[in-house]
Amino acid sequence: MTVSPQVIPASAAPAPGTATPPYDSSPAPLGRFDRLAPRLHRYGLGLLRAGLGGVFVWFGVLKVVGLSPAAALVVDVLPFRAGGWFVPSLGWAEVVLGLWLVSGRARALALPVLTGHLCGTFAVLVLTPSVAFAHSNPLLLTLVGEFVVKNVVLLAGVVVVTTATPTTVTPTTAAAASGARGPRARV
């Protein structure tokens, strides 16, 4: 009797004196998620771009019409005295940035502009830490602190949508993404 590190079920073991069956190299069948994921990925960047742009436009419009709950925070954090023009102007800038994001144009220029804007929101953490942190503890965020820190996610999304390379969908890649096999795969 020979001891082998490979465990072969009795039903799959070759009969004594016969050749070992060849290794089955065909890929395992794809699960539902594995078949769906490439299709979702194809639309994911567009959805992320639209979502980020929509958030910028929405927050900007609220500033323009004077209904932004963040307006007082913006004015309090500024190191200079801002007039009544500043928050609406910032709102218009956010509307333009949001529309720029949605358009997908001039991404190489959009990245530093959007990054600068989002990093500017972190000034709250440095200039008014008592507003952002409870009990002077940087691990205990206040509502304002959470509002500011979530911009890390927005910043990551901006990096993704502005640096993504466009992909070409061909019948071959579309068939592979849908899990179809064979030359007559529908696109």
Image (cartoon, rainbow, N blue to C red):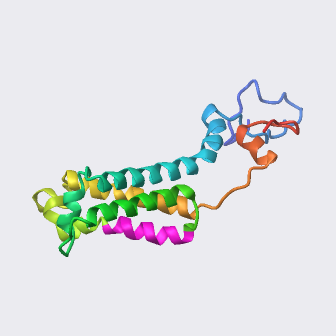
Residue 163: percent from left, percent from top: 56, 64
Report the magenta residues as a range.
108-120
Q: Is residue 17 left or right of residue 139?
A: right
Q: Is residue 156 visible?
A: no
Return the residue found at the far bottom.
80
Side of 72 relative to 175 (left or right): left
Can residue 123 be seen in the rendering of this structure? Answer: yes
In front of the other: 42 or 140: 42
Name the residue: 19% across, 70% down.
127
Asked where in the image residue 6 lies, by quadrant, the reply is top right
* Depth order, front residue of 18/51: 51
Please indicate whether residue 124 sits to the left or right of residue 62 in the image. Answer: left
Question: What kind of secondary structure does the magenta stretch mostly adopt?
Answer: helix
Image quadrant assignment for residue 72: bottom left
x, y percent for residue 76: 17, 65
> Does residue 86 sit above or below 140 in this rendering?
below
Locate residue 182 relative to residue 180 in the image: left or right.
Answer: right
Q: Quadrant of the N terminus?
A: top right
Check the image and report above or below for 157 versus 43: below
Residue 64 in picture, x, y percent from top left: 32, 56
Rendered residue at 44%/50% (across/down): 54
Say how many tags the image has.
Answer: 0
